[in-house]
Image (cartoon, rainbow, N blue to C red):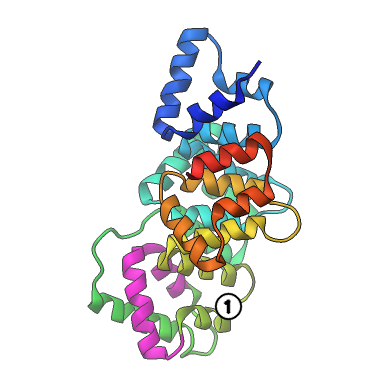
Amino acid sequence: GTNEKTLIEIIANRSNKQRQAIRESYKQAFGRDLMKDIKSEIGGNFCDLAIALMEPSALFDAKCLYGAIKGVGTTETTLVEILASRTNQQIKEIREVYKKEYKHELEKDITGDTSGDFRKLLVSLNNGARDGSPPNEEHAKIDAESLYKAGEKKMGTDEATFNRILCTRSFGQLREIFRQYKKISKKDIIKAIESEFSGDIEMALKMVVRIAECPPSFFAKRLHDSMKGAGTKDDALIRLVVTRSEVDMVEIKERFQAMYKSSLEKFIKGDTSGDYEKLLLAVIS
């Protein structure tokens, strides 16, 4: 029989790296696969969350991307959420793990399932080629000017310029570019994107901007969206809690409180139950 309380304590209070070590020592001690044992003992969302936490991070991201591409209808926002918020190194690892797991390139699956400017943006993000140098005001002015010329200032929009700048500049540099843009244009970059683009590419560019501006605010909103209204989007809730738990969860909880005048804990308690709820709360604590 499973002791759920012990399982929650073991899984929740460890880093992903430590969980990998636990899997290894479990195999050595019992000659069995911990993941298989978890799956045979528990079910539902509690099981999905436990398994997600036990997966190596890059593999979990790869599986989420695969599900977003190959599931019923492509889940566009999930593709952008993952590819736009990971570091160059993480994206490199995701691509490697994806190829190992699914026997084909992530890029090929992305291009096979999307089209137009949205496809180009995803391919750029999937290259994981963000510049790592510190923010530079002069360069930011030049880029802001380029964005202005590519969008508001001309008839028809030059998508390639938006793509290039939003996918290859660091978040710190993008924040500086957006500041400079507002000086030149008198409207902020989100408003500019809304007037110049539509459909998936508009959604994706806005997501990249929001992530660059403040990842914790972006993820607080994503968490809120996964729980508001009727029915919880559990796959999203699990993905967000698992992937941010070792990154910026403290800041996300602060932003959540400020944005929704209620704690993330309170939302989770109102929306989930049982061991699933307990494990979620333990992971974000």
Q: Is residue 147 above or below residue 240?
A: below
Left or right: residue 186 compared with residue 113: left
**Residue bearing the label numbered 1:** 197
Residue range in magenta is: 160-187
Where disc 1 sits, the SS reads loop
Q: Which of the pair 214/183 is nearer the observer?
A: 214
Q: Main secondary structure of the magenta part?
A: helix
Where residue 106 sits in the image (x, y, percent)? 53, 45
Where residue 278 sits in the image (x, y, percent)? 59, 38
Q: Look at the image and tell me whether residue 105 can be seen.
A: no
Which residue is located at x 46 percent, y 90 percent?
Answer: 153
Magenta-colored stretch includes residue 234: no
Q: Amino acid at mark 1?
A: Phe
Which residue is located at x 26 percent, y 75 percent?
Answer: 139
Left or right: residue 41 compared with residue 81: right
Left or right: residue 90 compared with residue 152: left
Q: Which of the pair 1/61 is nearer the observer?
A: 1
